[in-house]
Image: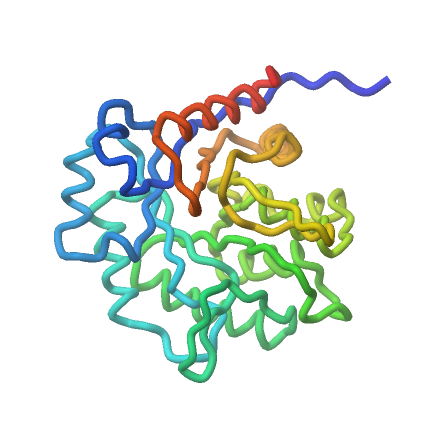
Amino acid sequence: MPVSRPPPDVPSLGLSLRGAWDGAIDRCPPAQLEVLAESHLAPGAGRALRRRFPDATFHVHSVCLDVGTTDALQRDLLGAVADLARDLEAATVSVHLSFSRAGGVAVDDLLPLPRTVEALQHCVERLGVVQDRIEARVCIENVSRYLDPSPSAALGEAEFLAAVAERAGCGVLLDVNNLFVTSRNLGLDLERELAALPLAAVELLHVAGHEAWASGVLVDTHSGPPCPAVVALARRVLEAHPRAIPCILEWDRDVPSFATVSAALHGVRAGLEGDA
């Protein structure tokens, strides 16, 4: 018989803040709020958000601090993100373990890194600079993959992330949806990926929705509520984690009303508690 497990300590749940909810979210803000750094870089923006949501725990998430690219680090952006994190007294600051620029050309996507010794060392060095400027431990987030840029690499995806986190002394933002999408698309052993994750370094979870194309490929749209399998996977991570950690629901495309997203967040809570 399968072993009966108690439900995990359900973490504080929250949302990635979107401007479309102005007014509605102010009346009933979640305990945890993640802000997209690049949308709040104006001087004083962090202090304004802190006044607007005085009781919230903030998380700062940057999509443009490109730790994987070999292009020069954007020092002005780094300084602005550091100022925002300071003004918000952010609990976490996160970046993606990926690249989106090369040779001065930017693409509107988060591209997976080759899992080489050179790429690992480069990311560790770049993260050292970022953490020194922000004066805080930064979290790296796993991205969705549709093709494997280095199928013969000695390190798997989770093992590569674990090696970067350990050598850089940084934390991990585990996007459970991205882990699920990548495992399905590339035929990875999800149990092996979970076993290789540095759970003790995980400081924050993301859950989100995805879509299935006719070809069977799962596309990381971050639109719609997370499917039950993604919520179940998040629950497994929480069951195995040494402490309760926050969980953020992301909804990046086709953003609906705050009421709709709040209902989805209640669904996530029910799934984590084993009621759905």
Rendered view: 92 above or below 70:
above
State the residue lying farthest toward the bottom.
Answer: 103
Measured from the top left, where is residue 197 in percent x and y?
Answer: 64, 48
Residue in view at x 57 percent, y 19 percent: 273
Rendered view: 139 above or below 240:
below
Rendered view: 53 above or below 223:
above
Count numbered badges in the picture: 0
Measured from the top left, where is residue 276 in percent x and y?
Answer: 61, 18
- Position of residue 206 in the picture relative to residue 82 (left or right): right
Measured from the top left, where is residue 147 in percent x and y?
Answer: 68, 64
Judging from the image, the colouring scheme is rainbow
Residue in view at x 35 percent, y 42 percent: 34
**The image quarter in which residue 113 lies:** bottom right
Residue in view at x 42 percent, y 79 percent: 105
Residue in view at x 38 percent, y 64 percent: 65
Nearer to me, 40 or 125:
40
- Position of residue 101 in the picture relative to residue 116 (left or right): left
- Position of residue 47 in the picture relative to residue 33 (left or right): left
**The image quarter in which residue 7 lies:** top right
**Location of the N terminus (image quadrant):** top right
State the residue lying farthest toward the right.
Answer: 1
Nearer to me, 71 or 144:
144
Measured from the top left, where is residue 92 in percent x and y?
Answer: 37, 45
